[in-house]
Image: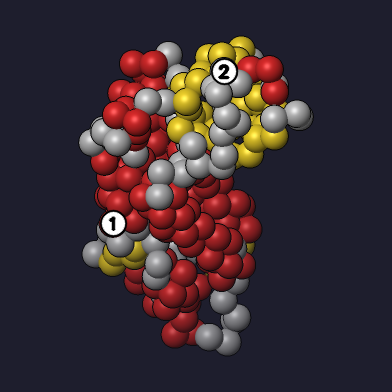
Amino acid sequence: MIGTILSFDSETGGVLRGEDGRRYTIAAAAWSGDSPPKAGDRVDFDAEGDMAVAVYALPDDIIAAPGPFLADRPGLPIALLLLIACFLPFLTLGPITANLFNVVSTASSLGRYAPVNVNMETGLWLFHFLYVVPALAVTLILLEWRGLAGRWTRIGIGLVGLLGPVAIALGARALFTATTAPQGRLAARLLRKAREYLAPDLFVPQIGAGWIAIAVLSLALILAGLFWSSPAAAKKS
């Protein structure tokens, strides 16, 4: 397996990061080179649990010939698509659509009539936590670009993107309360009745294409973290 030295001392050993994203402890006796390595050196090693054994310096010709840019960054195109998906319709309310960034303002503009007989204002604040999805997508793009994203980073961000919106939506829905229009507001009651009869499903939220795309791409990140191995790591392990 290929790795990068993070720190090393000829007496106490050190730590390296493998291309699988994990950190491995190096015993001083595990180093097989003539001179101790320094931080940033690329090495070949065998993994035994969390220990790196038989650690060798990589020949210069191997270090100078990196593989394709995306070969070690499977999460980069997925993270880019995930960020784009955040701008697609996340929820639809009949002819009205809301992406992940304006779902709160859109639902709030519908007031206490969206959905019918439900006051959404008591739970809409939870939808602000949806911003974690594009934030994590941007974070993963930066980590992948610098070659710092490991399998657990991809899996973790994928789980948040897959389960986070569901948990937030269910939590917000649990906080919604039934509307009780004041008796004196005749116009409000008539408006509600008209909407119930003329368009009963108009203000019932439905999952949009953006939500589906986020779920699919998040699942792809999880699968990339679970099963993807870089060509260099597969060749050496």
Task: State the residue in front, 199 or 149.
Answer: 149
Question: Is residue 41 toward the left or the right of residue 200 in the image?
Answer: right
Q: Which mark is residue 32?
A: 2
Placement of 159 over or under 87, stated as above or below: above
Disc 1 packing (10 Å; few <14; some 14–19; many ≥20): some
Task: State the residue in front, 206 or 157.
Answer: 157
Query: Residue at (30%, 52%) from the top-left corner?
Result: 80
Placement of 135 over or under 188, stated as above or below: above
Amino acid at circle 1: Ile
Disc 2 packing (10 Å; few <14; some 14–19; many ≥20): some
Helix, strand or loop for disc 1: helix
Q: Residue 152's x, y, as percent?
A: 53, 34
Q: Which mark is residue 151?
A: none
Q: Residue 7's x, y, as percent?
A: 63, 39
Q: Would residue 139 be seen by someone viewing this image from the given angle?
A: yes
Which quadrant would residue 86 be assigned to in this image? bottom left
Give the number of callouts. 2
Question: Is residue 38 toward the left or the right of residue 188 in the image?
Answer: right
Q: Which residue is mark 1?
A: 84
